[in-house]
Image (cartoon, rainbow, N blue to C red):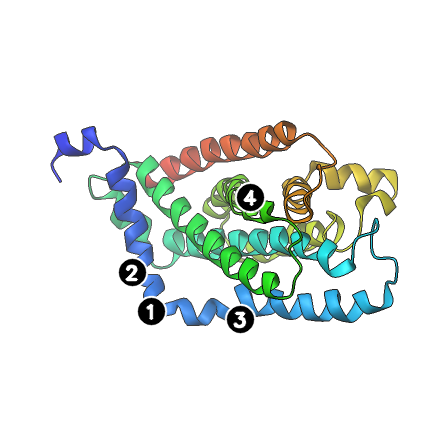
Amino acid sequence: MSVAGSARFPWVPAYAVFEHYLVGLRRTWRAGVFSSFLLPVLTVLGFGLGVGAYIDQGVGGVRYLDWLVPGLIASTALQVTVGDSTWPVFSNFQWVKTYFSQAASPLRVGDIVAGHLAFVLFRVLTTIAAFLLVTGLFGALRSPWAVVTLPVVALLGLAVAAPTFAYAASVSSDSWLAMLFRFAVIPMTLFAGVFFPVESLPDALRWLAYVTPLWHAVDLCRAATLGVAPQWSIVGHVLYLGAWAAAGWLLAVRTFRRKLVV
């Protein structure tokens, strides 16, 4: 497409970047099936049906499996997002250097970031759509509002992927990426209301849970799948996740530009 055409349709260069990753996914999608889809389903079976069988009263009067599933939806989206926003970004700078090839073309830094972010969101949405289908077969979705979890996890994906892009682009060793999983992703998954209510935590840990993007997505997903009101306001959740996404976008573009533009 000509420069004039790109000016009329500014999304086209970013779509070209997205399409690049989509072509690669056609060859490698089988390798991610277990981690992004089968593993959460096995968790549903193990925790929801296994542990849930010993929780007679459920949680808040709700069967434990039904209460657990929205937390797993959000945490699965988080793990897919971080997985696709760490080593792939680091590799594109340090190993295969794909970003430098893209920057040598007419693509702008914003196009490179936006196209890769779009691919991460595609991965998140397709994973969660399949997850919803399977959990629906278990009868764990109590409300037709469960479909709202898709835009929720998309917003969570943006809120997490954008700052993670900036982090992965700025570190000098992939050991820092493993530390991100160890000291951020795993604690968030354990203490952000996925497996048990955050109200059961001590006050300090409870407020740390509220700070994480994951808790806000868990609360929205749980409200959608159970057909109840969230603990916090919907607008407050959306604005908070949106603030993470906006700040992360600015950091990512700034970091990418510093490394790609000489």
Residue 150 visible, this orientation: yes
Circles 1, 4 touching at the beta carbon (< 8 Å): no
| Amino acid at the residue labelled 2 | Val
State the residue position of label 4.
148
The front one of 212 and 108 is 212
For image coordinates 31% across by 53% down, the residue present is 98
Circles 1, 2 touching at the beta carbon (< 8 Å): yes
Crowd tier of the residue under label 4, counting other residues whose Cα lies within 10 Å: few below 14, some 14–19, many 20 or above: some
| Amino acid at the residue labelled 1 | Arg
State the residue position of label 3.
34
The front one of 126 and 190 is 126
Q: From mark 3 to mark 2, how far is it between C-alphas?
A: 20 Å
State the residue position of label 1.
27
State the residue position of label 2.
23
Q: Nearer the viewer, mark 4 or mark 2?
A: 4
**Is residue 195 found left or right of 169 in the rendered image?**
right
Label 4's element? helix
For image coordinates 63% across by 40% down, the residue present is 213
Image mark count: 4
Q: Position of residue 257 (x, y in %)?
A: 36, 35
Q: Earlier in the sequence, mark 1 or mark 4?
A: 1
Q: Earlier in the sequence, mark 3 or mark 1?
A: 1
Q: From mark 1 to mark 2, how far is it between C-alphas?
A: 7 Å
Q: Earlier in the sequence, mark 3 or mark 4?
A: 3
Rendered position, 187 above or below 204: below
| Amino acid at the residue labelled 3 | Phe
